[in-house]
Amino acid sequence: MLTQPITSSTAAETPLVAAAFFHLRFENIHPLTDGNGRVGRLLLAEQCRRAYGVPLVETLSALHDYEHDYRAVFAATQPALQYELMVNLLARVLLVPVPSPLPLPFPLSPVFPERDTRPAVGMRGTNPYPKRRSAFF
């Protein structure tokens, strides 16, 4: 729910903030056993293409050029700082202004921690990858 009415400036910034939050949430949930970074960056590039018309290849190339800054986002320990760094990085990639208030809209931690697929997180035994019955669970 929005706390303020959408004006022309906030309407232009909303896709930037949404893409940054979605990407961080996807990476923190870690839904796949392998390839989360590549899939997450591809989804991020698609969101940018839909919102700003920037081709996928250009967005992915820019993220590759800013690899050091991209890794710094995930090296930050606090979710609010990760969010701020990701919004600033995307603003540089897309050449759009950064919104001034950057409150974290929702927590980034996994909603269902028992489904966390990161190796050796919450797992018993030495096998870092869980045995799954299907591709979805």
Image (cartoon, rainbow, N blue to C red):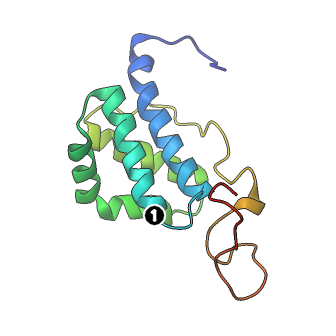
Where residue 26 sits: x, y (%)? 55, 50
Where residue 6 sits: x, y (%)? 51, 12
Q: Quadrant of residue 134?
A: bottom right
Where residue 118 sits: x, y (%)? 61, 69
Work out which quarter of the rendered image holds the N terminus and state it: top right
Q: Residues within 10 Å of mark 1 (few under 14, many from 20)?
A: few
Residue 13 as seen in the image, left or right of residue 60? right
Position of residue 134 relative to residue 6, above or below, is below
Q: Look at label 1 and name its amino acid.
A: Gly
Position of residue 127 relative to residue 61, above or below, is below
Work out which quarter of the rendered image holds the C terminus and state it: bottom right
Where residue 69 sits: x, y (%)? 34, 59
Q: Quadrant of residue 100?
A: top left
Would you name the residue on which mark 1 appears? 35
Identify the secondary structure beneath mark 1: loop
Q: Is residue 88 visible?
A: no
Position of residue 57 relative to residue 125, above or below, is above
Instruction: Name which residue lies at 52% across and 62% down.
Output: 76
Instruction: Name which residue lies at 23% across and 37% down.
Output: 55
